[in-house]
Image: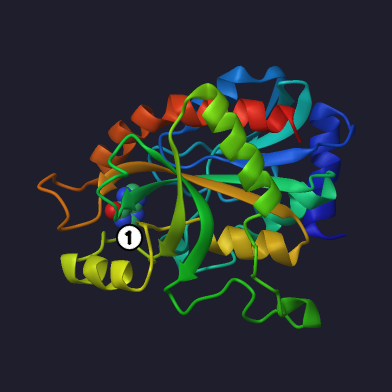
Amino acid sequence: MSAAAANAEIIAEYAGSEPIKAALVLGSGLSGIGELLDDRVEISYGELVGFPTGGVSGHGKSLLIGQLNGKRIAILTGRAHYYEDGQSDVMRIPLETMKAIGVDTVLLTNSAGSLEADTPPGELMMIADHINYNGLNPLIGEQTDDRFVNMVNAYDPHLRAQAKAIADDLMIALHEGVYAWYSGPTFETPAEIRMIKGFGANAVGMSTVPEAILARFLGLRVWACSSVTNMGAGLSDENISHHHTKEMALKGAKKLEMLIERLVGEL
Ligand code: HPA
């Protein structure tokens, strides 16, 4: 039995086997939305096969199943990053598990550095496209022809339009742009930030891109949004740090929660 199938059985034992519509992956400091779930069941990653149990502070280590705005969803309260162990496909089994429990849409969130003066810390940037700047790909080694994933419109245009309409209705400013994936764990240098901005990126971060690739490979719809925690290195006088990221994530978190709650309701 595959790890995903084994996990689906474990999840059904804890939370029942009614299909789950969507999965939400939470970025650093964005865990508040888990509190909004009704009929919430919590399963520690340690109970599941191939879920990441290591950790980055500010990230949770459990899977939540429950109802949000009338829809049954799963929340991955934390993710693993490439920089933790050098595995760019570290989120493959968790995402395969989501597919095995019926998920057709994944909502990815992260904290990111902004490259745009009009998108300062506390603002949200919905991801319209990405630049995989690492030369890494979670599908390297995949043997099937499914590995040749078409990445045009990887971030579902319909979901983006839905989210924009919801944000307008809630009077939340929702920027849209290109997210560049740097491996981390160091933050970028000012020279790297100037370069990646010249390449067309609007925000930079250490996650999300490999998950979006894996999700598209699995045939899942993808929506993703960054909560801006800082300006990219060299673009402001602030001192970039992980502590600062976690603190500043709270500024955008409330808006992101409101947006996601409504978006889930419309799925
Ligand atoms: N760079 C990379 N990742 C990040 C940043 C950043 O400036 N801020 C939050 N995550």
Residue at the location (50% across, 64% down)? 130
Quadrant in which residue 33 is drawn = top right
One can see residue 29 in this view: yes
On screen, residue 96 versus residue 51, left or right, reads right
Is any atom of residue 90 visible in this view? Answer: no
Q: Residue lying farthest left?
A: 237
Amino acid at circle 1: Pro
> Residue 72's spot in the image, x, y percent?
78, 29
Residue 173 horizontal/vertical position (percent):
43, 34
Specify whether 160 is left or right of 245.
Answer: right
- Relative height, residue 149 to residue 188 (above, below): below
Q: Which residue is pictured at 46% across the width and 69% down the height?
A: 131
Residue 178 percent across, percent down from the top left = 45, 60
Label 1 beta carbon within 8 A of ligand 1: no
**Number of numbered markers:** 1
What SS does tag 1 mark? loop
* Rendering colour mode: rainbow
Give the residue number, with chain letter if any, for mark 1. Answer: 185
Q: Position of residue 97 (x, y in %)?
A: 76, 50
